[in-house]
Image (cartoon, rainbow, N blue to C red):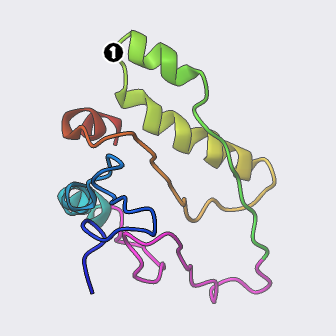
Amino acid sequence: MSSPQSSSSSSGHTYKQAGVDIHEAAAFVDDISGMRARTEKNRKLANAFGMFAAAYDLSDYKQPVIVTGCDGVGTKLELLLKHDLLEYAGKDLVAMNVNDVLTTGADPIMFLDYLGVPRIDKRMLSRLL
């Protein structure tokens, strides 16, 4: 079986030809794993780092109700980039989602994130995270 980096679809295109370097992305995930480790002291998530899903152990709750929030940075990102304040984007993103969950009276117990970028720029992404 060939690697995703070199495999091709029926049209003959590879991830690399499309501008996707999955090895570089995997290396970046490895680079930031230390950041994740700092948040795990009270963690009740199933080990799914790097996956596109997560599970949380709700056994401490008598009658759990799952409350979700979904908010984005939106056009604030343009202002943050213009004024070289990228470090605030991640904090703003988490804060807005936490606030939305808190308005329901729920505990914000987990945050499922997604970061879509056209290319890996480690310096910029490190500032964002």
Residue under the point 45% across and 69% down: 10
- Position of residue 62 relative to residue 101, above or below, is below
Q: In the picture provided, is 105 more to the left or to the right than 129?
A: right
Which segment is the magenta one? 39-64
Which percent across, then down, holds residue 70?
68, 49
Say above or below: 41 vs 59.
Answer: above
- 11 in relation to 65, above or below: above
* Quadrant of image for the C terminus: top left
Q: Is residue 104 above or below residue 36?
A: above
Magenta segment: does it hold 85?
Answer: no
Q: Secondary structure under badge 1?
A: loop
Tell me the residue that label 1 is attached to: 84
Q: Quadrant of residue 63?
A: bottom right
Prevailing secondary structure class for the magenta stretch in the rendered image: loop
Q: What quarter of the picture does the N terminus occupy?
A: bottom left
Q: Residue at x 49, y 53 (%)?
A: 114
The structure residue drawn at horizontal position 32% and vertical position 51%, both measured from the top left corner, is 20
Left or right, 116 with reference to 99: left
Residue at position x 53%, y 44% from top? 94
Question: Measured from the top left, where is residue 72 in percent x and y?
Answer: 61, 38
To which quarter of the image does residue 38 belong? bottom left
- Please identify the residue farthest to the top as the structure is shown: 83
Residue 127 falls in which quadrant of the image? top left
* Rendering coords of residue 102 (x, y %): 72, 50
Q: Nearer the viewer, residue 50 or 63?
A: 50
Horizontal side of 2 relative to 60 (left or right) equals left
Q: Residues within 10 Å of mark 1 (few under 14, many from 20)?
A: few
Q: Position of residue 21 (x, y in %)?
A: 26, 54
